[in-house]
Image: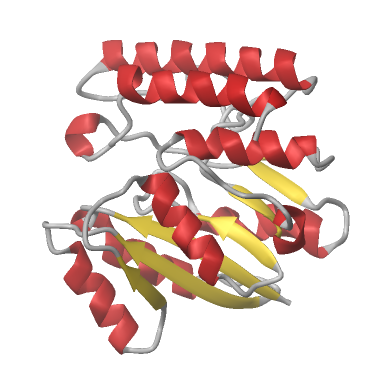
Amino acid sequence: MKVSILIPIFDEAPSVRELLDKVLDVEIDAEKEIIVVESGSTDGSREIVKEFEAAGKIQALYQDRPRGKGNAIKAALAAATGDIILIQDGDLEYDIKDYPRLLAPIIEGKADFVLGSRHLGHEDWQFRSFIDDQFYARVINVGGKFFTMLFNILYGVSLTDPATMYKVFRRSCMEGIHWKCNYFDLDWEMVAKLIRKGFIPMEVAVSYASRSTAQGKKIRFWRDGTTVFLAILRFRWFG
């Protein structure tokens, strides 16, 4: 069995080397195919990715400019050949050591689609905490809570964290699906469309250490909140 680990990278120089080393080192019960999509970074991230590619450790795709996280993931999905897809962000907010826990339900035949829930890993639903901007962290937490409630009502599920980056599923699940979104709204499109195909995700608790915009977090509440809201509504009935 092969697991395709998809990693979109844009301006992640402080963390990308450590991240790739950890992904390479983590032990899982499957072969690893690591696909990195580098989206025109200007901080040295591309050069680091090229080092790993030259050493034969990863497969790399290079975009001439940033087209959005969702666009990078779509490019990686098109190149993936694994039996299982695992999406990994280019930072260290999530713990790579959670891979075995995320993959186990699929490898053992207990699930086809798994979400790594940040909520289940915390007693408080406000799992984002920015050291340098607690107010913005609260805004993002409230927005996430609202979108999760809206999603659950519209799709008839009871998920705790549909927006999580850790999405793991059999590649066969996405047969016949055409992905449309190019930004953070792809996170919601993927869950929406897989649910509409009948794949209700199993949630597994994962570790999470949030970072602020000053530390490199790229999501913006109003810009990305608007596209997420529209995606939740749109893919309930269309697309």
Numbered disc total? 0
From this view, report whether residue 149 is shown above or below residue 216: above
Q: Is residue 162 left or right of residue 58?
A: right
Q: Nearer the viewer, residue 73 or 139?
A: 73
> In the figure, 74 relative to 166: above or below?
below
Q: Residue at image x 28%, y 36%?
A: 218
Q: Is residue 153 above or below residue 55?
A: above
Mark yes or no: residue 125 visible. Answer: no
Observer-nearest residue: 24 or 187? 187
The N terminus: image quadrant: bottom right
Question: Seen in the image, is 189 located left or right of residue 6?
Answer: right
Q: Give the percent coordinates (x, y) of residue 41.
A: 18, 57
Left or right: 42 as drawn, with respect to 8: left
Q: Which residue occupies 29% across, 61% down?
A: 16
Q: Quadrant of the C terminus?
A: top right
Q: Residue at x 68, y 50 (%)?
A: 177
Image point (41%, 50%), residue name = 71
Color scheme of the displayed model: secondary structure
Query: Toward which corner of the image does residue 235 lie, by quadrant?
Result: top right
Q: Nearer the viewer, residue 23 or 46?
A: 46
Visible in this render: residue 179?
yes
How far across and down, in percent of the image, does residue 194 sit? 73, 42
* Whole-percent x, y for residue 226 in the image: 41, 18
Q: Position of residue 116 (x, y in %)?
A: 62, 42
| Residue farthest toward the front in the current orientation of the protein | 238
In the image as oriented, which residue stretches furthest toward the bottom?
55
